[in-house]
Image: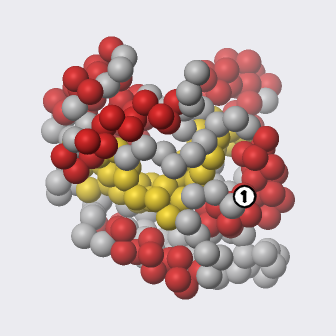
Amino acid sequence: MRPLYFWTAILENSDQYYLRPQDLPTWQQRLSLRILNLLGWRLRFKSLPGPHGVVVVYPHTSNWDVFTGLFCKWAIGLPFRWLAKEKLFRGIAGKTIGPVLRSWGAVPVERGTASGAITRLAETMKKSDWFWLALAPEGTRSYKPHWRSGFYHLAVTAKVPLLVVYIDYPRKEWGVVDYLDLTGDQETDMAAIRAVYEGHHGKFPELESKIELAPPRGDDPAGAGRMQA
């Protein structure tokens, strides 16, 4: 049986990678895309280049991003993972909502950790048959002067491609089509990322963070930033 990402090859024959319900293999995916379309949104998707990678989603300026993003995830039908606070998997919360979060692709992470968390995630990714991790580099819907750099260091450490996903509110469009192989040269890599996002804006453009990495922290010599749940 072929990996999940192979079924999407047929979709690349469609115009500009726009997905259509009739092209999708399961009724759940078709229903998710139809609901997304009824909300006025379109989805562009290009096949994943392999079974491992890091995903960044930008610009994240509204709670609606999560709502429409879930329908995009369900329409694509691939088990993208995301980070959740480790405390949600302990105690009563761990017994109640923990299993639900895991079924939705959540990966527990301890907030406030940096390079250690990145190293552990990179090792987990390499050991997994399929592991694509989605991160919001802004870390918040509010304006920030820079991006958190955890996604960058994770992709470089694990030596996996970076999927650069855009949200375009003026066009009502999600774009899941651009992949980058990072060089490790931050200036070169961030310029390539900015080029992908040029012309795409969120619901509240004034809240969009600048597309540049945060400077290294004094207690974080690797410059890894903080992994945001």
- The single residue placed furthest to the bottom in the displayed view is 187
Q: State the image coordinates of residue 146 (x, y, percent, origin top left).
A: 51, 75
Q: Is residue 109 visible?
A: no
Of residue 189 and residue 211, the one placed in the foreground of this image is: 189
The residue under the point 65% across, 76% down is 184
Of residue 216 and residue 152, the one placed in the foreground of this image is: 152
Q: Is residue 36 above or below residue 194?
A: above
Q: State the image coordinates of residue 171 (x, y, percent, origin top left).
A: 17, 54
Q: Is residue 97 above or below residue 186?
A: above
Of residue 159 and residue 138, the one placed in the foreground of this image is: 159
Q: Residues within 10 Å of mark 1 (few under 14, many from 20)?
A: many
User: Element under label 1?
Assistant: helix
Q: State the image coordinates of residue 220 (x, y, percent, origin top left).
A: 79, 74
Q: State the image coordinates of residue 85 (x, y, percent, origin top left).
A: 68, 42
Relative horizontal placement of residue 17, taking residue 88 as reference (left or right): left
The residue under the point 53% across, 70% down is 147
The residue under the point 75% across, 46% down is 126
Q: Is residue 188 visible?
A: yes
Question: Residue 75 lies in what quarter of the image?
Answer: top left
Of residue 10 and residue 55, the one placed in the foreground of this image is: 10
Q: Quadrant of the N terminus?
A: top right
Coloured how? Answer: secondary structure
Question: Residue 9 lies in what quarter of the image?
Answer: top left
Relative horizontal placement of residue 9, taking residue 170 as reference (left or right): right
Relative horizontal placement of residue 106, taking residue 60 as reference (left or right): right
The residue indicated by pointer 1 is 158
Type of the residue with mark 1: Ala
